[in-house]
Image (tube, helix red, strand yellow):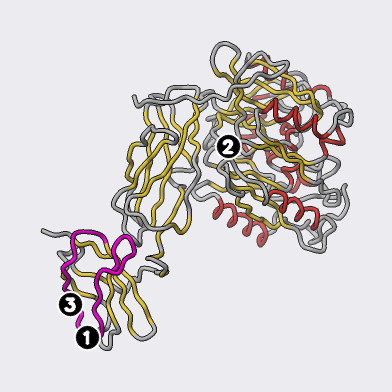
Amino acid sequence: MIPLIILFLVFQFTGFSQTTVYNPAEFEKNEGVLLVWDYNPSRDSITANIIKAVQQTAMAWVIYYPESAPMDTAEIRSYLYSHGVLPINLEFVPGYTETLWIRDFGPMIQYGDFGFGSERFVTDAGYAAYNRPKDDSIPEQIANLWEWEHQDLPLEIEGGNLIFDGLMRGFASKRVFEQNQQLSPDQIKSTLIQHFNLQDFVFLETLDNSGGGIWKHVDMFMKIIDYETIMISEYPDYLPDYEVLEQNVATLSQLLTHFGKPYNIVRIPAPPKADGTYATTWDDEMRTYTNSLTINNTVIVPSYGLPEFDQQAYDIYRETMPGYKIIMVDAQMLTILGGAIHCITREVPTEEFMRVIHKKVTGSQDYSQDYYLYCLTESNVPIDSLWLHYKINDGAYQRVPVYIVCPQYTGIIENLLPGDTVSYYFEAENATYSTTYPLSAPAGNFKFWFNAVGNQEYKIEENLKIIPQPSTGSFYLANIETENLDFVRIFNSFGALVWEQQYSNQNFIQTNLPTGSYLIQVKKSDKISWSKILIVKQ
């Protein structure tokens, strides 16, 4: 077993009996998803389609009404099977409910230590304004059923108006101010920071003229992708809430992540209604692609029967969350009621709390023969091993151990060449449990590459081949006409020019360079070609 520092966030909260609290982000590892069976033929198929997507990667718990209802559990199960749901990762949970909006009234699940080690507990926010006492009682019903601790959050707020980046910050719209007028904004902020163990909380402007009803939740225009990335809706500039939304984007763009860098903001165009128009009043239909559910390696995204917009949203998710399964579920019967996919689901984090915290390295990087990648872990169970998995260009994945050193754990990728593209992910594991970052690994990963030598940008050309490869320092240039060649230059791994031959009409190159990785540059007329070479002395 490698040594492990188990990190806990230790605070003392007024009214809390536990002293350690961790508030997981939705995109971290989950055991499953809670949904309410709606007993409504126009929406039951939506629930079935969500369950079908969820059960590929997690448990789906369906809350059914335990007394007289239009369908018993056998009938519900039969309906689900007829719609493609499998008899795996599916359980039924008795619960007294009135609506399907479990995101808003359902249990918010955190980790806390009540004297027996870190365990899951239920946070129960106020939900008294809607005259639905059964819905309001669901967090306590679930806590009692699963024998978990239950804590009240002394605020009126819906779960759809609370999202977290997983490390330091929470977000809500200023709708919460309207709901808790007995408290000042500073008091509300302090309560949220304290209860969810945050460093900061940000309140965004409400979209008052974009439909969606009175709720004005952040999940209708914003989604946290990972510790560093936020997806935000984009509206046409003629809509009344365009400037408000752009103001929210400006606010978010000025914030720094846990790693001290601005969030990466991804924009996703919001779709119009079926008639091609957009909502311009509070009580109209609000359509959005940010109201999606991330469950482990899968993202369930609302669709609207608009091929151009739906395909565009699919492509943006696929690019933003590489390797994740993107599954679209028709949500037209939900948005007319003020919500979408996220609104009718509530994730349940795993019993084992294990995560890798990493500032991802992506895009163009300065070349280094040996590249260092850093991370930390947090866990309430022992971690036996911590790995960095990587592949170079189109090769197979390799793995190297991550060394437990201060101040950050370190994984090293060695013997890289100047033109390499590196794809990588982290994995923490013990005998019974494991997690990766990102959760879409190995299909998904983080990717970076080297494309500069000194101040020169380059791209490896397929038509410039080096034969043999590797060589002893003497080689042929293949697939290139050498007549009237301007020059051939060779750069070492630090970007320094180490060999040059001008006006050569030969394709045979002879050098006396030592063992190492190099980059060759060939110029003919106005075209410059690049290739990698590896020299190995006998």
Looking at the image, residue 520 lies above or below residue 99: below
- Circle 2 Cα neighbour tier, 10 Å, few/some/many (<14 / 14–19 / ≥20): many
For the point 44% across and 55% down, the residue is: 448
Label 1–label 3 contact, CB within 8 A: no
Residue 508, numbered label: 3
> Mark 1 sits on what residue?
505
The type of residue carrying mark 1 is: Asn
Quarter residue 373 falls in: top left
Frontmost of labels 2 and 1 is 1
The type of residue carrying mark 3 is: Phe
Residue 54, numbered label: 2
The type of residue carrying mark 2 is: Val
Quadrant in which the C terminus is drawn: bottom left
Q: Earlier in the sequence, mark 3 or mark 2?
A: 2
Q: Which residues are magenta?
A: 491-517
Taking the image as shown, residue 507 lies to the left or right of residue 201, namely left
Q: Is residue 509 magenta?
A: yes
Q: Position of residue 384 (x, y in %)?
A: 37, 26
For the point 29% across and 73% down, the residue is: 464
Helix, strand or loop at label 3? It is: strand
Quarter residue 267 falls in: bottom right
- Give the CA separation, mark 2 to mark 1: 63 Å
- Circle 1 Cα neighbour tier, 10 Å, few/some/many (<14 / 14–19 / ≥20): few
- Give the CA separation, mark 3 to mark 2: 59 Å
Quarter residue 85 falls in: top right
Q: What residue occupies the far bottom of the structure in this picture? A: 484
Looking at the image, residue 538 lies above or below residue 231: below
**Residue 475 in view in this figure:** yes
- Circle 3 Cα neighbour tier, 10 Å, few/some/many (<14 / 14–19 / ≥20): some
